[in-house]
Structures are given as C-alpha cells and as structure tokens.
Amino acid sequence: MLFLGLVLVLELGLAVRADGLTDDEVLYIPAGYLQLTASDFHVNPTAPPLASTLAALGLLGAPIHVPEPRPEEAEIAWAYRFVHEANDPATVIARSRAPVVALTLGLCLLVWVWARQSHGPAAGLLALTLAVFHPSLLAHGHLATTDLPAAFLILLGSWAFWRWSRFPAAWSALLVGACIGLAAATRLTAWFLVPSLAIVAAFEWRRPQAAVRNRRSLALLILAVCLVAPVAIWGAYGFHYAPAPGLSVAQPPAERLSIPGQLVAVALRQHALPEAYLEGVRYQLEHVRQGHTAYLLGWRSKTGWWFYFLVALVVKNTPGFLVAVVAAAVLAVRSRTTRDPAVPSSTAHWIVPAAVIFVSASASSVQIGERYILPVYPFLILFAAATLSPLLKMARARWLVVGVLVLHTVPSVWAAPGGYLSYFNALAGGRLGAHRVLLDSNLDWGQDLPRLAEWMRLHGIASVDLAYHGSDNPDRFGIRHEDLPGSHLYPEGPFRASSEGFLAISPNLLFGLVSRVGSRYADLRDRPPDDRAGVFFIFRVAGEGALAKSPSTR
C-alpha cells in the first residue's frame, strides 16, 4: 500500500508541473481566494464555492496580490489578471492544485479502506491499484476544479451510509448529512447522492436486521441529513446570505424563468439558502434547459445524445479497467442466484450511485466532458475489485486478474508524458485519433501550451502562428507567436512573422467546437497534420499560407 501511495504522489506531482492552466481553473482559483480571505462570493456565483475555497487554502502564506477591478470589467478578465499579471502564475497554479492532490490521496485511501473492510485485504489492494493508475482520476486529481472534490465527498457520503447500515451510530448519520451538504456545496450534481442512498435503502430493506428497518435509527438518519446538510451549505458560504457586503445577485424577470427556476425564486425570497448558491441552482437549471454545444463522433448538438457518456466511458478508460468491469458484471450475474438476500452485500452501495449518476448525466443536455461522470469510477473500481479478488485464490483464474492489472497500469504509465487529461485508448485511435470521437475537456482544456513549448524547443522552431483555445498564456512558456483567431483571454501581441511557417491549432478550434471561428479552419480538417505537439495540430505552410492575417480576423 505504501508503495502505491508513493507512486500516486509521484504521478500527481509530475502532472501538476506538466499541465498548463485549464479553462475552469482560471476562474476558480481567484474566486476561491476571495471567498476564503474576504467572504466575497460574487466572482463566480454560478458554481458552489467549496472546491475553489479548498484550492485557495494552498495560497495561504504566499505573497498574493488582489488586483483592483477595472470599470465594467468582466469577472473572467479580472480573474485572468489575478493569475497571470498580479501574481506569479506558476506559483499560484501549483499551490492551488496542492489541496486537490491531497483529496485525491484521500479518495484512493478511502477506496482501499472500503474494499478492505467489505471484502478483505486482497480486494483492498486490487481496488487501490485500479484507482492509483486510473487516467481520469489522475487527470482531474491534480486540477483546482470541482470534479475530484465532488467525487471524493460523494464516495465518502456513500461509505458513511454503508457504515451506518451495518452499525447504526450517531457519528455515521451525521457524517452522511455533512457529506451530502458538503458535496452539494462543491457541485450541484452531487444532489443525486440523495436518491441514490434512498434506492440503496430500499435494497437494504430486504435484510431482516437492516438498520433501515429500525424506525428510530432511520428517523435519526433522515433528521441528521435534513439538519446537517443545509448547515454545511451555509457553512461553505461563511453563513453569509449575500454574495458580498452590499451586493446582490441580479435576478431575471420571473416570467422568463422555468417552473424549477420560479421555485428557486421562492427559496430566494425566503432566504432558505445563501443567495449565491440559489443563483447557481437557477443558472444551472436554465443552462440545462437551453443546452450546450457538444461534440461526439464528428456531430455537434446543443441537446446531447443518450449515449454520449457511454462512448466516453468506453474510449477514456484503459483496456484493463474495461475488462475488469465487464468480467465483474458477468461474475456478479452468475453468482446472484446463489446469494442469500439476508447476507449483507456492498454491491448495491456501489452499483446504485454509479448508475444514478451515469443515467442522470446521460439525460442532461449539458455534455461537455467525461468529468461529469468522474464520481462513477470509484464505485466501479470497488465493484470490480471486490468481485474479482476471489479469483486470486484460484491458480488458473488469477491470471485474469494479473492480465487486467497489466492492461490497466501499462497504458496509464505510457500516457503520463502526454498528460492524463487527453488519454484515449486504442478504440479511439489513442490521443492522436481522439478528435474523431470527443473534444472539449475530454481532450483539449487549454492545458497543453507547455507541450507546445517543448515541441518548439526540440525542433528548433523560433515562432508559430497560434490558434489557441484556453485560459493560459503562451508568453509564460516562452512561446513566440502570432495570434490567429481563437478563444483565449491573454492580450494579443504585435505581429511576429513565423519564418518557419508553422501553424499550431487547438483541436476545439480546428474541428468547429467554437462556433464563431468554426468555419475559419474548415479547409484544414481533412488535411493530415505535419506533426502534433500535445493536443495541438501542427501544419507547415509556405510563407503566411492559407491563413494569412487580415484586419477582419484580428
């Protein structure tokens, strides 16, 4: 276990340094610092604050300067100046990611503990190995975003409920309520933990000695959830109703709100929860109603596809992990007829939350990344480890487990230099073919400017024409560039002709995910790139080539 823990620390530590700033981090880091040090929640009211506040813990003790906002300046522009101009970006980014790395260590430890408690040491070691080398957990386990913290708190709440269902106690009931509240204060989709636990309780009811059959214990659990969860949300906002002193969230006219939005408006009038939190709920409800442009297999849609996350699960996981889950499902189906329903089982505690989260994400019209199903993976890891661990006692069958681990660990280790965020397995053609299947935060979240800089150094390229989609700044990596139309926050610099005639283009721009420049690079989509630098497509053209600058493109 200690060896795997050291491996995990090494993986995450190297990833913190290797990946550039991602799109969400540029807003979460400055917002979290204001939340932590000034109880000011106005910068990012559309997202719950806990994850960004935790990330800001890493900035305590550092010489952080908070820039003064400029007249009519958007929050995202101010956030960019906070990270890239007012402070040292490398220090700010690395220190903000450290708390999330700690949570990732905690998540893997919890996976090991739960598997060990329920199915023994072999299951615990197998679960820990699957977690330590899981590309998606590693990809988001070192970023200052909401994804990994929410996954950890959802898993912790589920484990607390499992402990309560075995040994009802006040501490486990309070922990369930606290985890639900803290998870909901981290990511709004964490509320799906409530119906998940209710369904698990229905499965538990079959056991004659189940805690859910004890009315007093069940009543105390429900009371703990109803009381503690709201207190946890209020606590995440420092028990302040308004986003900041003297500020209030501007509300749209009631006639423009959907029915759920109008219910949120009622909660706002009653001060049921902090104003910024309820505004986040309203915003996300409207976001789901309006949809978000998504990309899948070359198609684009604002309403999504029912199979989007199924495709993401298949292509974003290692072959070993996929084999482990399928083999575990087959074994579980074969053994269910011989299992005594009165005997405690952990399977429902893992499969139900995974299924509820997965189905809910698939039904949503906001499909912008596999990270939305990140909480599913710890549950699948536990299910696979617990089901496959008995095979280690069988001489012939243990080779299946060994093969699973090889097919899981080797691709993960091999993917590390290119970054875990852009990992795709061979079914998608690997990282080089990933753009044919998925874009957005599955592949290109603005993280690969460091790899573009390394490619330029290795090939002796002095300057590139750059079409970048992201929130980082190429200047901080020494990338001399001439800006092409893109989607970035940094100020465009003066013209610097690229003597080598190299174009570096983000996949999100090249394949039309950003509609306002979607047609700009259409002629290059069917042309094989001359090289790849991380996720960037590299094209070589004569002179200024087909993408010569004009006043209309600047």
Image: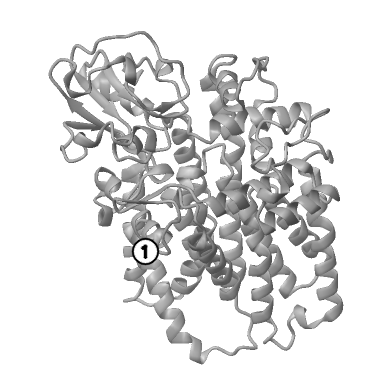
x, y (%) of residue 444? Answer: 38, 38
* 496 in relation to 33, above or below: above
Q: Nearer the viewer, residue 295 or 230?
A: 295
Residue pointed to by mark 1: 322
Residue drawn 48% across the image and 67% down it: 385
Q: In the depicted view, which residue is nearer to us: 250 or 187?
A: 250
> Is 516 placed above or below 406 here?
above
Split into 4 quadrants, where in the image is the C terminus?
Answer: top left
Left-right relation of 549 to 339: left
Seen in the picture, residue 148 relative to 456 is either above or below; the reply is below
Q: State how many labels appear.
A: 1
User: Would residue 393 be visible to someone looking at this image?
Assistant: no
Q: Residue 409 vs residue 291: left or right?
A: left
Estimate the x, y position of residue 232 in percent, counting from the top left.
Answer: 79, 50
Q: Is residue 459 visible?
A: yes
- At horizontal 79% and vertical 30% (from top left) the residue drawn is 247
**Residue 23: x and y, percent?**
49, 34
Q: Is residue 240 above or below residue 229?
A: above
In the image: residue 340, left or right of residue 247 = left
Q: Residue placed at 73% from the left, 36% from the top? A: 250
Q: Nearer the viewer, residue 98 or 359?
A: 359
Q: Residue furthest left?
A: 542
SS of the residue under disc 1: helix
The percent coordinates of residue 48 (x first, y second) are: 67, 44
Q: Quadrant of residue 528?
A: top left
Quadrant housing residue 319: bottom left
Q: Amino acid at mark 1?
A: Leu
